[in-house]
Image: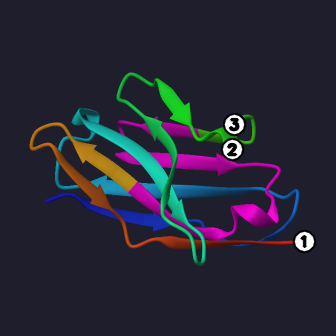
Amino acid sequence: QVQLVESGGGLVQAGGSLRLSCAASGSIFSNMVMGWDRQAPGKQRELVARIISGGSTNYVDSVKGRFTISRDNAKNTVYLQMNSLKPEDTAVYYCYAFAIANHQNYWGQGTQVTVSS
């Protein structure tokens, strides 16, 4: 069983920055695809970013050039650096993991990010 614990959410003004962190345990971190999803009020959850063990990344178009996902395999941690935040980035952000060993998806409990205009 994979456990994911997020931290780093909060309230920020438009144009500001936040960095989210997610500590993973319960499986071999280097064998997991990691990422972040988000869910805004009244909307479906959407993929924000993914990163594989080798470092390749992909992003939803709306955050390209503003958000950066990274991982530290030695610390079993994935990060999401969010710059130039917009009110439409307001959402609950969930850490995501896909465990290659058992082909299962996992999500953390979520952390609230609120961007004021």
Pick the residue in front: 56 or 30: 56
Name which residue type carries label 1.
Answer: Ser
| Helix, strand or loop under label 3 | loop
Q: Is residue 98 above or below residue 10?
A: above
- Identity of the residue drawn at 43% across and 38% down: 72
Tell me which label, 3 or 1, sits earlier in the chain: 3
Q: Is residue 49 left or right of residue 19?
A: left
| Residue corresponding to mark 1 | 117
Residue 5 position by quadrant: bottom left
Pick the residue in front: 76 or 40: 40
Are there few (<14), some (14-19), or many (20+) residues within 10 Å of tag 1? few
Tell me which label, 1 or 2, sits earlier in the chain: 2
Task: For marks 3 and 1, give the CA distance.
Answer: 20 Å
| Helix, strand or loop under label 2 | helix
Task: For marks 1 and 2, give the CA distance.
Answer: 17 Å
Q: Is residue 3 magenta?
A: no
| Residue corresponding to mark 3 | 64
Q: Is residue 78 magenta?
A: yes
Q: Which residues are magenta?
A: 69-95
Task: For marks 3 and 2, give the CA distance.
Answer: 4 Å
Q: Is residue 27 left or right of residue 3?
A: left
Quarter occupied by the C terminus: bottom right
